[in-house]
Amino acid sequence: MRLSLLPLALLLVAPLAAQRNWVVNGDFSKGLTGWTGSGPGNNPKVETFMTDGLKASPAFGINAGGKIYNPPHAPYILQQRIPAIPGVTYEVVMDVAITGSRSNAQAGIFEIKFGGKSVAKRDFGRFSGRVVLRDRLCARFTLTKGGPTTFQVEISRPRYIYSSRTPRHYIDNIKLQIVTGPTFCVRGDRVLGKTNVWEVGGKPKDLFVVFVAPKLLPKPVSVPGYNGVFALDVASTLVLYSGALDASGLHQLKFTMPNIAALDKAPLYFEALGIGPGGRIFGSWHNWGYHK
């Protein structure tokens, strides 16, 4: 159904600034500017790859693993220093992919750490070869300490050595932002016709509503009576589904996106609204488009 529960004032209020990404050069559009890399791996560099399955763009690539067989092998680490704020809620997202022509007993592991704390991790298990494995790491978390803090991405194959013929790993579109409202995440490779887990995170026991639209407003807007900002194009926004978060602040739903050609690589922006004792608050937004 069409978006109807938001007041008409949504169209009239002044636009606000978009979400701030605290990661410098998270899309690698400026090569490795802002990043420091170290550790074992073959041919670490920025190159063009379709990491998210939607569009080819600059991404960091490496064949991870040990140089000499002596497991467990250390990861390759990309890192930068970011000012951290204790007690606030962060959201982190990162597109990851693995490709290669040969099968391998270990595909690879991606992990994000902030201040030494592991905040997101994905282990792909075995690799069958001649495929591209994809996912988007997403998580919400808080830190107890502030100040200049190390943000790092680890890419590893701890059981095996690397070569030009072992799986190649890619990361792209890394975002770290402070959020006050709910977050939305699609777990797993977003392939049309495949079942994924849709996950909403926020304050425990809050109600939520998830919206979707094919495009964003020119700039996010504030809405009288609501906290946060709304970023989706009002004219094309649909109310997708609603529910209640559990005692841990999560809600998961299994959903199979229809295999419709028009949806292949088409933008699909999701944003959630949280409703609870603290009021009504809009959350973060991202393009969670699907591909064949």
Image (cartoon, rainbow, N blue to C red):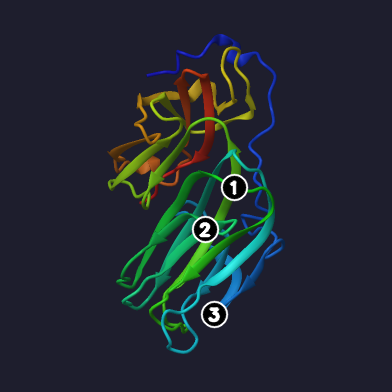
Label 1: how many residues lie within 10 Å, few (<14), some (14-19) or many (20+)?
many
**Which residue occupies the foreground of this view, 204 or 102?**
204
Determine the residue positioned at 44% across, 46% down: 265
Residue 98: x, y in percent? 42, 66
What separation in Å lies between label 3 and label 2 (alpha carbons)? 17 Å
What separation in Å lies between label 1 and label 3 (alpha carbons)? 26 Å
Kind of residue at badge 2: Ile
Which residue, given by chain and number where applicable, does mark 1 sit on?
176
Above or below, comparing residue 142 to residue 283 in the picture: below
Which residue, given by chain and number where applicable, does mark 3 sit on?
40
**Which residue occupies the foreground of this view, 197 or 13?**
197
Quadrant assignment, res 178: top right
- Extreme residue toward the top, this view: 8
Element assignment for label 3: loop
Label 3: how many residues lie within 10 Å, few (<14), some (14-19) or many (20+)?
many
- Counting residues from the start of the chain, the first of labels 2 and 1 encountered is 2
Which residue, given by chain and number where applicable, does mark 2 sit on?
112
**Which residue occupies the foreground of this view, 160 or 287?**
160
